[in-house]
Image (cartoon, helix red, strand yellow):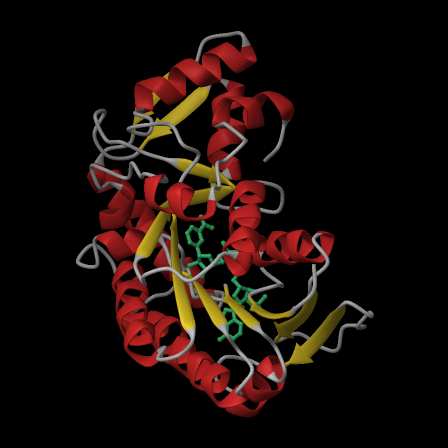
């Protein structure tokens, strides 16, 4: 397969897997990086820059047929932090893609959170970015992926939950009835590559999960953990006031460490939402993509 893809977010968890998949399929990649010079190869060119730097974005998309926009702000202490990167940064990248004159397809890695923009700063920023990109895309074919919680090698957010589960403790956030869903990063990366080579489609967001209809509730996660470790799993509900207290401590320690916090009151509204089940129906019908890795299989095989 031939074609050059500009990819953002490659130094992060998901972006790395996307690039590995693209390279294995024969694509050439131009990857944006904010870190110091990385050595390029014949098939992977590193472009130093950032979403805030229009010149570097112009260089990134120069001559490419495709853009996969995976960079994103996933943690932050206020709304502006998310807006600056996820909305304004995405607009800048689309502008560069349009001006390149070569880009035919642009895939935006949004989030299932965008389904409920009212829940969090993060969710709203992804939703607004989707709207802005849809308005701007014009002759570029735009795709919007809304993956649910993604896990796999290199992930730092869900790994602790699964590690605890396999040690026999499952901390529950939100109500016992809440529906959750998950997606292995390899399945997401495969969907990205397949989308790039698919034909035209109407612009609408595609949800992605591991294909378990209705998702998981906490009890089901407990059962899976017990089956995999072949032993008891204790499900421990974390009361909302305690979760908020942990968020306050996290905000303070992040402030002192000059880092952006993951757990905030805004994030808690998202994490404790009742229904994060998702459906692959639209995407499967469009690109014939079906996830291969179930959560139980991943836990058994240590694929996280
Ligand atoms: N992980 C999930 O469960 C999940 C679920 C749904 C959607 N998503 C979306 O998937 C994308 C990747 O998530 P992830 O989990 O891989 O996050 P991650 O590990 O934090 O990676 C984020 C990536 O974005 C880059 N980035 C952030 N701000 C940037 C900027 N201003 N300019 C250039 N690059 C910038 C980071 O670069 P540095 O390395 O320089 O910081 C990093 O490469 C995000 O858009 C996220 O919203 C994630």
Q: Quadrant of the N terminus?
A: bottom right
Side (left or right) of 54 relative to 3: left
Q: Residue at x 24, y 34 (%)?
A: 174
Reply above or below: 153 against 177.
below
Q: Specify the farthest residue to the left.
A: 118
Residue 146 image point, x, y percent: 37, 52
Q: Specify the farthest residue to the front.
A: 199
Q: Residue at x 22, y 37 (%)?
A: 275
Residue 221 image point, x, y percent: 39, 22
Q: Quadrant of the C terminus?
A: top right
Side (left or right) of 99 relative to 298: left
Residue 229 image point, x, y percent: 55, 13
The residue closer to the viewer here, 56 or 263, is 56
The residue closer to the viewer here, 301 or 286, is 286
Reply above or below: 3 against 101.
above
Q: Residue at x 44, y 21 (%)?
A: 169
Side (left or right) of 129 relative to 188: left
Which quadrant of the structure image shows residue 4?
bottom right
Q: Residue at x 37, y 40 (%)?
A: 280
Q: Does residue 85 appear anywhere in the picture?
A: yes
Side (left or right) of 194 relative to 219: right
Q: Does residue 264 appear anywhere in the picture?
A: no
Which quadrant of the structure image shows residue 63?
bottom right
């Amino acid at each position: 397969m031939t074609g050059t893809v500009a990819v953002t977010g490659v130094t992060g968890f998901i972006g790395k897997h996307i690039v590995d998949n693209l390279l294995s399929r024969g694509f050439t990649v131009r990857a944006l990086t904010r870190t110091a010079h990385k050595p390029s190869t014949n098939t992977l060119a590193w472009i130093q820059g950032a979403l805030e730097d229009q010149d570097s974005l112009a260089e990134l998309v120069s001559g490419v047929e495709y853009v996969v926009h995976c960079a994103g702000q996933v943690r932050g202490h206020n709304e502006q932090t998310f807006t600056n990167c996820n909305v304004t940064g995405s607009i800048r990248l689309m502008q560069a893609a349009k001006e390149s004159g070569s880009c035919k397809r642009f895939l935006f890695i949004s989030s299932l959170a965008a389904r409920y923009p009212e829940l969090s700063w993060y969710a709203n920023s992804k939703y607004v970015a989707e709207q802005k990109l849809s308005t701007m895309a014009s002759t570029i074919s735009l795709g919007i992926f809304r993956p649910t919680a993604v896990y796999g090698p290199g992930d730092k957010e869900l790994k602790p939950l699964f590690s605890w589960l396999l040690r026999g403790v499952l901390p529950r956030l939100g109500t016992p009835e809440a529906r959750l869903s998950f997606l292995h990063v390899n399945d997401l990366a495969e969907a990205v590559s397949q989308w790039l080579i698919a034909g035209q489609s109407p612009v609408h967001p595609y949800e992605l999960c591991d294909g378990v209809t209705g998702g998981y509730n906490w009890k089901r996660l407990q059962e899976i953990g017990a089956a995999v470790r072949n032993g008891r799993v204790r499900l421990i509900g974390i009361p909302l006031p305690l979760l908020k207290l942990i968020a306050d401590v996290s905000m303070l320690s992040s402030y002192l460490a000059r880092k952006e916090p993951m757990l905030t009151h805004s994030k808690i509204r998202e994490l404790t939402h009742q229904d994060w089940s998702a459906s692959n129906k639209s995407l499967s019908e469009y690109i014939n993509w079906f996830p291969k890795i179930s959560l139980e299989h991943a836990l058994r095989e240590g694929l996280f």
